[in-house]
Image: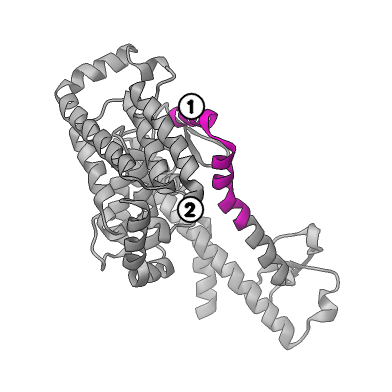
Amino acid sequence: MESNKDEAERCLSIALKAIQSNQPDRALRFLEKALKLYPTPRVRALIESLNQKSSSAGDRAQPSENTRTTHRKAGNTPAANGDAGGGEGTKGYTSEQVEAVKRVKQCKDYYEILGVSRTASDEDLKKAYRKLALKFHPDKNHAPGATEAFKAIGMAYAVLSNPEKRKQYDQFGDDKGQAARHSHGPGDFHRGFEADISPEDLFNMFFGGSFPSSNVHVYSNGRMRYTYQQRQDRRDNQGDGGLGVFVQLMPILILILVSALSQLMVSSPPYSLSPRPSVGHIHKRVTDHLAVSYYVAETFSSEYSGASLKTVERNVEDDYIANLRNNCWKEKQQKEGLLYRARYFGNSDMYHKAQKMSTPSCNRLSEVQASLHG
């Protein structure tokens, strides 16, 4: 922890300058970073003070919502003019949105974040996520901390919708949550259980794309990026030192190293479901039972025959069915999300488009299951 003290002091210095420049959101972001690196009573006091000011500002802003909206349409606000001070703080928000963000931050577990019981079904989880994701999306909710709340909601659903992760979370989640809250502060209990998909990708999967707004761009890899956040991140990075960059990159470097070592230790299967010239899997074969195509190396026939060949083909079919199930789930989620989004915005064209969406993986999976039981 002592090694982070200098970096925490640097973050505190940047936050104090941001407070003097009337940039509360930027100040709060660096204060929270400083708190994680090296918690001190002074940093906690400043965070509480900024949160109280944000809350009171939201209460005062609610009666003049119409006036503020009119000003934004006229292009008289910093956000409309694209000023350098853009961010969450330059856009209007209501006291209800501020209170909603506070509620999420004060939640003790994933179930409380989604507002469901521990016995909630998959459908209950989906309904809760759809409602909250639209409510807290950064392009609809500009209250301080809304982006973090949106991420927490996505993380909660991604973990609880995965049967294995949910089982682990039910068994160890509360213990890890207590430790994380003591170590990092409120709202960080989810660090012990992280999802395999980002909140932005999860939203795209559910709603068939990004939230409709000029502030969001969807690149070819399907990840959402917020333009106002990019501008702010560039300004923040100008003040980051080499140590901060190294600390941020360290988990990625460790992950790459562990992944490389695991690949060296685990032998790859003698087949691929698609051609892989890099490992010599270019010769096509078909399984006897389900007629699934797979590709092998030139020496495969001499190495596998009889019982060993049947074992390989059984593994091929298992992998094929697993891929179908995964793709079918994605197709259903995208179709259901688009239907829900169409109803939410009253868009009949989008609704008809969603109804016509095909689910080829689901169709093929039904055929395979029928042949297995036939």
| Residue type, label 1 | Arg
- Dot 2 falls on a residue whose secondary structure is loop
Residue 110: image quadrant is bottom left
The x and y percentages for residue 209 are 45, 40
Q: Circle 1 sits on which residue?
A: 231
221 versus 331 height, above or below? above
The x and y percentages for residue 227 are 47, 28
Q: Residue placed at 31% from the left, 66% from the top?
A: 174
Q: Which residues are magenta?
A: 228-255
Residue 116: image quadrant is bottom left
| Residue type, label 2 | Ile
Q: Nearer the viewer, residue 109 or 12?
A: 12
Q: Is residue 273 visible?
A: no
Residue 197's tag is 2
- Dot 1 falls on a residue whose secondary structure is helix
Q: Is residue 298 left or right of residue 193?
A: right
Counting residues from the N terminus, which is met first, the one under dot 1 or under dot 2?
2
15 versus 316 height, above or below? above
Residue 285's tag is none
Q: Residue placed at 35% from the left, 62% from the top?
A: 179
285 versus 19 height, above or below? below
| Label 1 to label 2: alpha-carbon separation | 24 Å
Q: Residues within 10 Å of mark 1 (few under 14, many from 20)?
A: some
Residue 342: image quadrant is top left
Q: Is residue 247 left or right of residue 210?
A: right
Q: Is residue 20 visible?
A: yes
